[in-house]
Structure formats: structure tokens, C-alpha cells
Amino acid sequence: MPRFFVDGSDGAVRDDRITITGEDARHISRSLRMKVGERLDVSDFSGMIYSCEISSFTEDSVELSVIERKLCESEPSVKVRIFQALPKGDKLDTVIQKCTELGAFDFTPVLTSRCISRPDDKSAKKKCERWQKISAEAAKQCGRGIIPAVNEVCSFDKALAQMSQCTLALVCYECEDGNSVRRHIESNLSRLTSGSTVAIFIGPEGGIAPEEAEKAQSAGIVTVSLGKRILRTETAPLFALSAVMLLTGNCE
Amino acid sequence: MPRFFVDGSDGAVRDDRITITGEDARHISRSLRMKVGERLDVSDFSGMIYSCEISSFTEDSVELSVIERKLCESEPSVKVRIFQALPKGDKLDTVIQKCTELGAFDFTPVLTSRCISRPDDKSAKKKCERWQKISAEAAKQCGRGIIPAVNEVCSFDKALAQMSQCTLALVCYECEDGNSVRRHIESNLSRLTSGSTVAIFIGPEGGIAPEEAEKAQSAGIVTVSLGKRILRTETAPLFALSAVMLLTGNCE
């Protein structure tokens, strides 16, 4: 079944009618040569999938009737929030693209004491727009049911406050050797029911400072180890997110 | 304990003596100002770590006596072989760098029917040299005990023959929806003892062709699903390798 995505620019969902415009409308009518009465799926990135029937064509648009609404089955049952200390260069681009594919719920870039990249407000805002585009493109390509939001760059303290609100929060820390991410997730599995939130914090190139790890621990957030090999700051979130998805049964 | 790496260019291991030369020798004597009798660890990428004591300095080198040899504890118990269909551009660079961090044993680029990148022999050889350098750099940075080898580009049939020799072999296939990578690894865990080999095959951008999947199945190699989100060709090996490492207890 062909699947199309609508958002502000390409179409709109109103009650049980959907209008597809632009590139996608031309693709449906001219390339796919679909006819009135034929079916297709539409996602509006609300986490829902709409099974639709084509009701009419105009020159530039396709009108659809919604036959059925269902939860998008590619969306994970747990919402994993990635808090990533700002890395150098374009590494966050990679993190956002790959973690969107792997099922992240949203992203929050964080400034920690050892971050080398420290953009001013204007530049940070511009970067956020760019990251949001990367997330949207990746979400479409891999068939997500939502577009993961990229939040504003925030301080470590603010990040900790937000992480404290999550069902489970993990600070990946290379000096931690007792508590592995696997054991920690497995021993908290019963809490990770549908709709629960998991926060993952990843430090910058130089790691998080010991006083930041202590601050997290004082806030009741555990530090976890990702194993004996030292992962780069842009590899660590991919691994930690894979671990959460895998162990919560979200890769079946 | 400071750790140094020796290979052909930077030093040599002979019986219970190690000579460190070049940049590292200067670092030990001038930057770290280490003295005779002080201790450091050396890896020669054989999977062993040598605990050494400094026995003497010359102008350009440092002589060490080996006190103890031990297995490098960052090396995983299972050898995961990545068979990756040649992707476009420099995506294999990323795969090799990240999978070295995540613990891969070696890499084999494979030509499948849908590969768009099809380098000639000369260009393939040059690329292999480049990939081997990337693997070596990543191995040093993340503290591996070996440098994962990058093998010559080979045909799909050759890859299948090699995969058949492994303890467990998985072909990641987006049209597979019954057999998840997690369930498959978990149900084979008892076979994945220390020193066993796991082969992971990842298709190119357009996926593996149905007839290639059938060929693998006829050769007794199972196809597995990585979940409901379609991972890019350069993201899939990171996830599949993470899954093997995590589920075999190699990230503790």
C-alpha cells in the first residue's frame, strides 16, 4: 500500500477528509496513475496512520476519504528522549538522523562544562532549524509515525530537571563500571510500560565532568556504563537507544 | 595506567622486552616525564595487553620489561564479522569507524546485484587500504585489543560461503517480518560461547534482492528483521552489531 505524508506544506487532514497537494498529488495522479476508489495510506506525523480512498482529483490536488484510523505500528511503545551534549562540527546531524531511524522521541542539545562548541543564541536557533529538517527527512524516509522534535539548546541543570520527570533516566558515563545499561534497563523493565519515557544523556567529546555526574546522581539519576570500549560522543546515543529499543521489545 | 600501542612503525614486542619509538617515546619521556621503574600498559593489537615497567631510555626510544601478559578485557567474547554490501559514497567509512568502536571483529565489503557503487580492482584495492586505516585509528581511539581487518571486496556467493562457516549467520532483510534479530540471537545464545563467530550481512541502499535472500536461505542462513522502521544501509550494521554485543553480555 503506498504511503504518503502530509504536513503544513503538502496537504491537510480535516475530520475524515484529507487533501494532498504539490509533488505528492502529481505523483499519485501522473506517476502512479491511481484512480478514484483506489486506496492509500497517509501519515500526518501525529502517530496515526489513515487508510484512505481516493474520492476525487482536481488539477493540483487529490481528495481522500478516511476509511480507518490506526496507530502507526512503527512507533515504539516507549518515548526515548535523547539529551546530547553539543558535539563539535556536524556530529549532531548524524546523531539526529540515525536516532530518528532508531526510534527516538525527541532531541535536546545540552551545554555542559566540557562542550567545545558553544554557539550564540542566533546561531543555536539556526542550527535547531537545520536539525529539525534532518529529523523530518529521516522520519519520512524510515516510515516513522511522528517527526521527533529538536528542542532548544539548554543548560545541564535544565536537562537534569527534565530528565527527572521521565520514567527512567540514564546518564552514560565512561567512569561508571558497575551499572551496565543492559542490567539497568532490564531491572526497570516492568516500569517501561506503553507511553513511558526514557531519558538518555550523552556527554561531549571530553566526557561529562565528575561533578556533573555527581550532580546527576544527587538528582536521583543513575549513571550507566556502555561497556569497556570507549564510544565516541556520536556513537554512544545510537548504542544506548538501540539497547532501550531492543530490550523493551520495540524491534520485533 | 597509561596505555600505548605498538605496531610496525612505533615499536616492537620481542619476548619479554618492548621497545617504544617515535612520537610515543617522546610523549613518555618528555610530556609524561616517566622514570625508570614506572609502569605502563602496552597493546600490540594481538588481543593481549602487556603490563610493563620502564627499564631504560635512549635518545629516541623507551625500553620496557614485560611484567605480565593478560587478555585485553575490551575485546568481546564473540567475533562478529560484518558483511556489508558496498554502499554509495563514503558510508562504509562510517560503518567501519563505528562498528570498530562497537566491537566488530572484521569487515568484508560485498558486491550484490543492487549495489550502485562498483569499483574496479584498482580502485577497490585503494579503498580497502583507506578503510584499513580508518579501522586502525578507531581501534586505537576506543581501546580495542585488535585492529579489525578489512578484507577484499567479494561476491555475494563468496560471502555466503564464508558466512556458512560461522557459528551463527544473519542476513538482515527488510521483507522479513517473522524472525526478529533479538529472538534469533536469544534462541541461539547457548551456541555463542567464547570464541564463536557471528556473521551479519547488510544489503545496499536498495536492499538485497528477493532471489539473494532465497539463496541465503537455501544455504541455511536465516533472514532476520531489525524491526518496523526501515534503517539506512549504514545504520543497520550499527544496530545489528549492538544487538549481538548487548545480548551476548559484551557491554558489561
Image (tube, coloured by chain):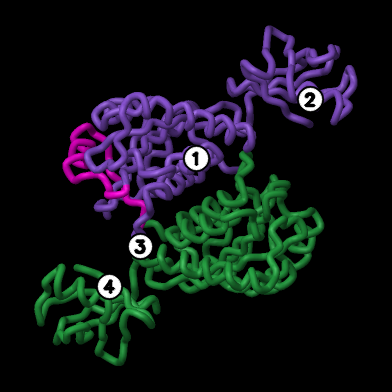
Chain colours: A green, B purple
Can residue A186 be seen in this snapshot? no
Q: Which residue corresponds to mark 3?
A: A141
**Secondary structure of residue under mark 4:** strand
Task: Write down the chain letter for disc 1.
Answer: B
Q: Say yes or no: labels 1 and 3 on the same chain.
A: no
Marks 1 and 3 in Cβ contact (< 8 Å): no
Asked whether the beta carbons under mark 2 and mark 1 sit within 8 Å of each other, the answer is: no
Give the CA distance from mark 1 to mark 3.
23 Å
Where is residue A2, by image quadrant?
Answer: bottom left
Which residue is at the far bottom? A15
Q: Nearer the viewer, residue B118 or B74?
A: B118
- Residue identifier under label 1: B99
Give the Cα separation between the discs numbered 4 and 1: 33 Å
Could you give the CA–CA distance between mark 2 and mark 1, rounded to whole angstroms?
28 Å
Are the numbered discs 2 and 4 placed on the same chain, yes or no?
Answer: no
- The residue stretch that appears in magenta: B205-227
Q: Residue at x 52, y 39 (%)?
A: B97
| Amino acid at pointer 1 | Cys
Q: CA distance from mark 3 to mark 4?
A: 11 Å
